[in-house]
Image (spheres, grey):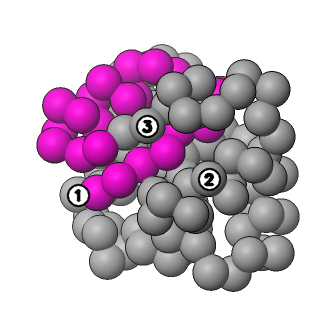
Amino acid sequence: MKFFLDHDVPGNIALLLRHWGHEATELRDALAATATDNEAFAYARANAMITITCNRDDYLVLAAAHQEHPGLIILLRRRSRQMETSRLLTLLKNAGEQGLSNNINFA
């Protein structure tokens, strides 16, 4: 699967996604650091990437406005990075590509 990571997603998430065999593009590698959430979500949609962000409020509004999107994962902040990555891995295993595509998920 192809993922686009918003600037607020910890860098270790990209490393783990790649380790698990996925493509992970971080915002800083694709867009200017000043890119708006709208620009970031548009980039992910244009490149058929599932967006991962911690910015729940703004991205839920964007997903509602653009009902056609490859998928959105809201990564909830946990007490530890290990817990965040564990929740993401559980989501990927349980939902699979079909459950993530064109849906909004929370990890």
The percent coordinates of residue 95 (x first, y second) are 32, 68
Name the residue at 67% across, 54% down.
Answer: 41
Name the residue at 37% across, 39% down.
Answer: 24
Q: Are marks 3 and 2 in contact (CB under 8 Å)?
A: no
Looking at the image, tell me whether mark 3 or mark 2 is earlier in sequence order.
3
Q: In the rendered image, which residue does mark 1 sit on?
A: 93
Name the residue at 72% across, 23% down.
Answer: 33
Question: What residue type is disc 3 on?
Answer: Thr
Residue 8 located left or right of residue 2: right
* Vertical position of residue 2 compared to residue 36: above or below: below
Query: So how many labels did they put on this image?
Result: 3
Q: Please name which of the two marks, 2 or 1, marks the residue nearer to the observer.
A: 2
Is residue 2 one of those drawn in magenta? yes
Q: Which stretch appears magenta?
A: 1-23
Whether residue 106 is visible, yes or no, is no
Q: CA distance from mark 2 to mark 1?
A: 25 Å
Q: Are marks 2 and 1 in contact (CB under 8 Å)?
A: no
Q: CA distance from mark 3 to mark 2?
A: 11 Å
Q: In the rendered image, which residue does mark 2 sit on?
A: 43
Single out the residue that lies furthest toward the bottom. Answer: 67
Is residue 51 one of those drawn in magenta? no
Name the residue at 35% across, 53% down.
Answer: 2
The percent coordinates of residue 30 (x first, y second) are 55, 34
Seen from the viewer's position, the closer of residues 53 and 1 is 1
Q: In the rendered image, which residue does mark 3 sit on?
A: 25
Around disc 1, counting alpha carbons within 10 Å, would you say few (fewer than 14), some (14 to 19), or many (20 or more)?
few
Quick one: SS at disc 1? helix
* Vertical position of residue 25 compared to residue 32: above or below: below
Question: What residue type is disc 2 on?
Answer: Tyr
Around disc 2, counting alpha carbons within 10 Å, would you say few (fewer than 14), some (14 to 19), or many (20 or more)?
some
Residue 23, by quadrant, is top left
Quick one: SS at disc 3? strand
